Amino acid sequence: MSKDYYKILGITDDEKALKGPEFEKVIKKKYRDIAKKYHPDVNPNNKEAEEKFKEAAEAYSVLSDEKKRTEYDSPSIGGGGGFAEDIMDKFMRDFGFGSRFGGNPFSEMHEQRVSKGGSIRLTILVSLEDVLKGVKKKLRYNRLEPCDQCGGTGKTDKSQEEKCTVCGGTGRIFRREGGIQMMMTCQNCGGTGKILKNPCPKCGGRGVSNASHEVEIDIPKGVYDGMQLVVHGEGNAPEGMNGQYGDLFIVIREKEDERFRRDGNDLYVNVDVSIPTAILGGTASIVTIDNKKLSIKIKPGSETGNISRFKGYGLPLFEGGGQRGDMYGIINVKVPTEINDEERALIEQLREKEHFK
């Protein structure tokens, strides 16, 4: 077996031999002690403590269930069905008919283990400089985490589990549609087959409650507006800690830039040129997104809207192996809004010349 759940919870060999209510009493205390010690609220930003907390929750979810514990202690139980039967069972389950062999305990255990908590979606703003270089951002948000009052069990010392009267403790109900009998998850007990009496007052027996959570994420180079990133395992905790944490979805929103306009991975920037330079030609300066100063040649007779291309000075392509888009300088002939008497007189003279009429 890949993990020793007994060792994770600190259960001795003598305690391991216990059964029923005696073992339940032991494991409940062991888990609560570990959960309180390594809870994320007590150990903020401590990845090691968070892993120990998740391991303990996983161990408890298996060993606290008598059926799962039996399967865990005897992993070879029930063998001999054969590959063909496994394939047929999977087909029947996937299409909602249940197992044709009356239920596979291993499959049910696997389905419960791979269930996930709900996902969370957040929106973050990034600048063009962030897109150029990539950036780390710390996010703080609320998510469902194991209840700190019951350690994620949903139970107290007064709690009792009773067999669900709707499904008879199987966690499944049958429904006939047309000529097909379909097996469905019991909505009354959520598929557990049990109803919890006197649950934890804080979480109502769910085992999870709202808590503040902080995570640092890497925003890679070349992201774009509307793009969605996925951070696995940073969403909500599953109810009863029976499964995996959900995922965190990050939606990228791009801040409007004062100088550059983005089109894909290309950038467009205005290049201000005086009237004399536009007429006679000359040079102008242009500063790139990564603060490199370039010179642009202005041809005689240039007009507003003329474009010059600077290859490779745009934004990086997402997962593009270092490739970048281009930058385009757009000529903007600047007309002065204020002039003095001498300048006015010169312009008056030019207005009468042939090429200025």
Image: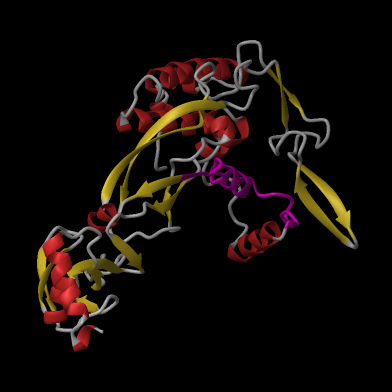
Determine which quarter of the picture holds residue 192: top right
Residue 350 x/y as whole percent: 17, 78
Front residue of 57/201: it is 201
Magenta span of residues = 96-122
The relative height of residue 249 versus residue 194 in the rendered view (above or below) is below
Residue 164 x/y as whole percent: 78, 30
Residue 97: within the magenta? yes
Residue 342 x/y as whole percent: 11, 64
Q: Is residue 257 left or right of residue 35?
A: left
Quarter occupied by the C terminus: bottom left
Residue 25, can we see it?
Answer: yes
The relative height of residue 53 versus residue 78 in the rendered view (above or below) is above
Front residue of 347/133: it is 347
Residue at 48% across, 45% down:
247
Determine which quarter of the picture holds residue 209: top right
Which residue is most to the bottom? 354
Residue 218 x/y as whole percent: 30, 48
Q: Is residue 204 left or right of residue 183?
A: left
Residue at 31% across, 51% down:
127
Residue at 56% across, 24% down:
153
Q: Is residue 15 left or right of residue 159?
A: left
Which residue is most to the top? 158
What's the colour scheme?
secondary structure
The relative height of residue 187 versus residue 39 in the rendered view (above or below) is below
Residue 326, can we see it?
Answer: no
